[in-house]
Amino acid sequence: MPITGTDIDASHLAILREIRQPILIALNRSFRNAYVAVVDGLIERIVEETNWEKQDQLNVALDILRNGKASIEQQFEVGCARSWKERTGVAPDGSYSTPEATIIQDEPPTLRLVDDDTMRDQLLVARISARARRRMDEELADGLRARFGALLQQDWFAENEYPIAPDIIFEVLRGILTQHQVRPGDGTASFLLDLFEPKFTVELIELYQDVNRRLIAYGILPELRYSISKSRASQYGSGEQGDPLGEGAEHDEHGGRGNGRGGRANGHGVIEVSEAEIGQWADQIGSGSEQSPAMLAQATRYLADPRNFGNDAQMAAHKQATSDQLMAVLSELQARTEEANSPEAVGTVMQEVRQQSSAAAQTHGSPLDRLIIETVAQVFQLVYEDDAIANAIKQQLLRLQVAAFKAALLDASFFARPDHPMRRFVDRLAQMGSDPDFETEPGSPLVKDIEDLVTWVLNNFERELVVIGEALDRAERIIADETARRDARLEKIAEAASRAERIDLLRQEIRDGMRARLTGGQIPECIQHFAEHSWTEVIVRLRDGTGELPFDEARAQRVLETLLWSVQPKKATEISELARTLPQMIADLSRGMAFIAMPGTEREAFLKTLMTCHGQVIQQSKNRPVTPVACPSAAAPAARTAGAAGQGMPAGQGAQAANGQGMSALAALAKNSAKQPAPAQQTAGKNAANADDYDQAWDEITRAGLKNGDEIERDHEGETRRYKLGWVSPSATVFIFSRYPREHWTVNRRELHELMAGKQVRVIRKTASVAAAIDALQAA
């Protein structure tokens, strides 16, 4: 059936029109990034390759990319726009027509003949796209399939059919690369497509995350719910195609979630197993044999499936089945872990109590009891291996392991429900331990509070999960206390950053006005640079009232007017006025440069160059006609413009004369300053965009949806550091990242964008610790 009809909802059509350009721009940017990475990789391989034939193949591929760069990028842009029109019906001008593409057909597919070349191309794209999908999170693609389907008012898209599916994008790229091959069928397009895939896929993952966030922000399926229905493909006798999740999964029409995500069922249906099989799983997992990973994956899928352990009746039945003898033994072992509170003791005791817990389940419990204990132990092992969690908190998590065995036996939905009390408690402790902005060193207030809380749980938890619920409340109070300690420190930093942002915006405003004043006159470039940077800083500091002021802003403006007048072409009658003006102007310039702490060598270089400029002006005035031109005095109004005095000399002569002896010193200063642009240039997205393609509305910060509380990784000085975003300025141009109590990092928006674009800063959005462990076990 068609993706849409002509009666598409008006609000959905408006969304499609709004997201079209941002998505296509981001897609083209992603392609360009991958393009650069592939070219760099080819050059490295050519240098390293010793085989002549392989080196020749690499050179041919590199020539295609280098010589055809502009054409390939343009064709890719056009191809993606055409594909978007075919699949959504929205054209560049916003007009709409029924899309040409179709979703999974209700009727069985018909056979058709294709030539060998077409078949080979289809297989190539299918192989490349399948590899790309394997690198992606399943939910990421599911979100796009469901949300684009909902947006176009239809069912899920197939995994290779939604508007920006890897298959579609790589097919566009394959067609372009094939056109650019030196010889038809020489295999270069296939070779290049293989090189593009890993680089491009990394970029596509970020794009897909961004598109999902955008669609959610528009209210398109904020959450997904998986339900079971008969696969369409099964109607035709095929279990390999049809339903996108392989089990008839459908998105809930209201976008709600069913029983939640407890690790995913990963497309598997209800698993029916006997007690003997469950016991076999437990034996294999406990023994650590070669078959253990496969058994562990099956067992975890079984336990994590909400259809097996997701309702009250199932939990009540298992709770009654858990023997009193088993719970009594576990309580004794729990008491032992209460006493183990040193790094040396915890490791030894935890290994012993795990083995004894499993043995107790074999003696006093059922095969399912033993499987639950063995699998919970595996979850704790993976949580413990998370390098992001501080060792002091890992120690407390290990102490909690036997209590977690009991909680999972009492409520067997531990794997299937994220809101299981013990699971939430473990996640909260792990979250505190991995928070880069919490003080997690041994002996810190946070670690001491967590240690006391775990001890309280071990003392009080018998068989009532309400105790774990109370522990969760206490954990929230611990988090609030630690956050308050951090916020008190961050407040002072934010106050300074807020002032810096205000000055930054003021600096940009003054510099913009300065640039407007410098246009039209014959001002030497070196003097323009001084006015735009050094004297702008003087005016900024004067207006802000920082430090002991040498004079007021009005005087600074008059000094600037005099400076600009002094270096413009003069008639002979003006030289006497210039001579009278220079001493006071030089004195005021010196005071201003000292006020902003301009280095002495730079001050001397500027004054030397200024003297050279004045010498050239005097020399050239001897050949000019005698027509007096007024000179701004110390009392002249600040509103006088610099260009008013620049008459009577051929355009360009003044600037050329100023570039004589002494210019080299200031040129060096200007070059040095250019390497370190003023903060306002880096911060103000609108003005920065005039110089390049930077746009705050579409920068990496916006794409990543960076917000307060998000965590990042930053590559700095040869190591990777983790921070939490603690403060964003009102205009979102200054960000403070914190690693309390070790350090904080204040950065302006433009610099942060560039670091994120260069992958030196990465936003981290981790899955909850237990969910991540369960997912890993299912994929074992």
Image (spheres, rainbow, N blue to C red):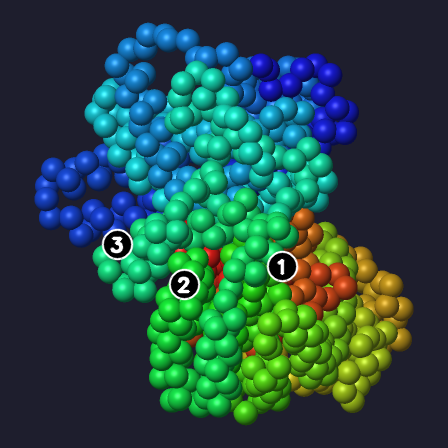
Residue at image position (47%, 17%) is 235
Q: Amino acid at mark 3?
A: Gln
Instruction: Locate residue 305 relative to residue 93 in the image: left or right.
Output: left
N-terminal of the pair, mark 3 or mark 2, is 3
Residue 457 place in picture, x, y as percent: 60, 80
Q: Mark 3 sits on what residue?
A: 291
Q: Amino acid at mark 2?
A: Arg
Secondary structure category for the residue under label 3 = loop
Residue 419 is labelled as 1
Instruction: Locate residue 399 relative to residue 564 in the image: left or right.
Output: left
Q: Mark 2 sits on what residue?
A: 370
Residue 522 place in picture, x, y as percent: 68, 57
N-terminal of the pair, mark 3 or mark 1, is 3
- Along the line of sight, the residue nearer the viewer: 331 or 618: 331
Q: Which image quarter: residue 413?
A: bottom right
N-terminal of the pair, mark 1 or mark 2, is 2
Say whether residue 677 is visible: no
C-alpha separation, residue under disc 3 versus residue under disc 1: 31 Å
Secondary structure category for the residue under label 1 = loop
Instruction: Locate residue 446 relative to residue 66 in the image: left or right.
Output: right
C-alpha separation, residue under disc 1 versus residue under disc 2: 23 Å
- Along the line of sight, the residue nearer the viewer: 75 or 150: 150
Residue 417 place in picture, x, y as percent: 58, 55
